[in-house]
Image (cartoon, rainbow, N blue to C red):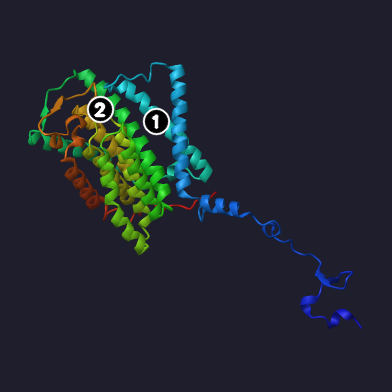
Amino acid sequence: MNPDAELPEVEKNVALRADGRNVPENPQPLPLGQIFPEPAETRFLKWLILGADGVRVGWSVALFLVLTFLCMAILGAATALVLPHALDVRPGVFTPASAIFQELLQFLGLLAAAALCALIERRRILDYNLIGPNRTRHFFAGLSGGFIALTALVGALYAGGWLHLGAASLDRMAILRFGALWGLVFLLTGLSEEGMTRCYMLFTLARGIDYWWALGTVSTFSLLAWWNTHGSGSGGVYLMALLGVAPCLVLHFKKSASAGFWQATWLTSTFFGYIHTFNKGETWIGIFSAAAIGFVFCVSVRLTGSAWWAIGFHAAWDWAQTFFYGTADSGIQPTGHFLTTSPAGAAIWSGSSDGPEGSLLVIPVILLVLVVLILVYGRRNRAECPSPAAQPQLS
């Protein structure tokens, strides 16, 4: 009689050990974590650094900023060795030659940092809010919008008697030369500043920022602005920080699907205002207007599907302000400009040394830009180019 015949089917193919107990012929090894359990400290560090989609967004952005400034410093040091006088800038002098070197170094440093982060996250650089439909059309629409908006602001200042316009200060060939040089400067400016805030930072933060982390970071920017005695216009940072507290809190408690995007918008806009406090001659209105236009740029990313409209608007606004009308730009007076202007009257209306961005009239102009942006793109593009969803990190 076969003894195996009396055993249940599930006990077939089981060998007898020397002690008489049955064991599987091919036992499965225990997971390593059960044999050698991870220390509590290791589990805590993993929880602190890693989330459901890979590295937590706060660490990703921190790494990006560190790499950006490190790459900029390395490129700056290399340029100083090869071209020792290229970065020499006299106080109060803002020329296209010196600005091109500075903006090019910033752009290349940012590009290198973005490439490293894209490699770590297994993405393409274009994934950071640079892919979307009609990119070329949006870029040129932004160029047109930036020039028209700045012209409207200058026109309002002129009509109110807070800005005096003079004649052209250059001959025909100089106009073409300086116009092209300043155009290159501010194209690099748009690519650098939008690339940092509305491309990498907005994309990354939107995929996982929490309200309380956003609040803590925004509060930190406000504290740093208050602490920075060499900065100016810190009140604009406080105002932008306060304006986002209640709306983002409501979205957080509603568990809105768009909460992450708007919290990232709040944080990056406040950060954009904060970095402008290091410019000399800024006022609280100028800093708030920088943060507010940063908010509008974030809205444009959501409506158009990419940052190209914002890049174009940013470049054209600065070009019109600096070259075409010859006004101060963020407290800096340019050389080599087309028209000549001078502020007049109370600083709160004229902008004084801050330029048109420091005038209280800039706020209704920014609101008008926001309304036009929503009217033009809100209905037509929302269906065909949804807001850029944060893709999960693949690493």
Q: Position of residue 6 (x, y in %)?
A: 84, 83
Q: Residues within 10 Å of mark 2 (few under 14, many from 20)?
A: many
**Image quarter of the N terminus:** bottom right
Cα gap from disc 2 to disc 1, whole angstroms: 18 Å
Residue at the spot 38% in from the left edge and 18% down from the top edge = 86
Residue 8's tag is none
Q: How many numbered badges does the structure rendering display?
A: 2
Judged left or right of residue 208, residue 317 is left
- Asked if marks 2 and 1 touch (Cβ < 8 Å), the reply is no
Residue 106's tag is 1
Q: Which residue is mark 2?
A: 332
Q: Position of residue 369 (x, y in %)?
A: 21, 45
Residue at the spot 58% in from the left edge and 54% down from the top edge = 43
Judged left or right of residue 318, residue 345 is left
Q: Position of residue 10 (x, y in %)?
A: 76, 76
Q: Nearer the viewer, residue 374 or 21?
A: 21
Q: Residues within 10 Å of mark 1 (few under 14, many from 20)?
A: many
Q: Nearer the viewer, residue 17 or 48?
A: 48
Q: Is residue 296 visible?
A: no
Above/below status of 8 relative to 155: below
Judged left or right of residue 32, residue 324 is left
Instruction: Choose mark 2 or mark 1, whichever is in front.
Output: 2
User: What type is the residue that disc 1 sits on?
Assistant: Gln
Label 2: state its secondary structure.
Answer: loop
- The disc, 2 or 1, on the residue closer to the chain's N-terminal end is 1
User: What type is the residue that disc 2 sits on?
Assistant: Ile
Residue at the spot 35% in from the left edge and 37% down from the top edge = 193
Label 1: state its secondary structure.
Answer: helix
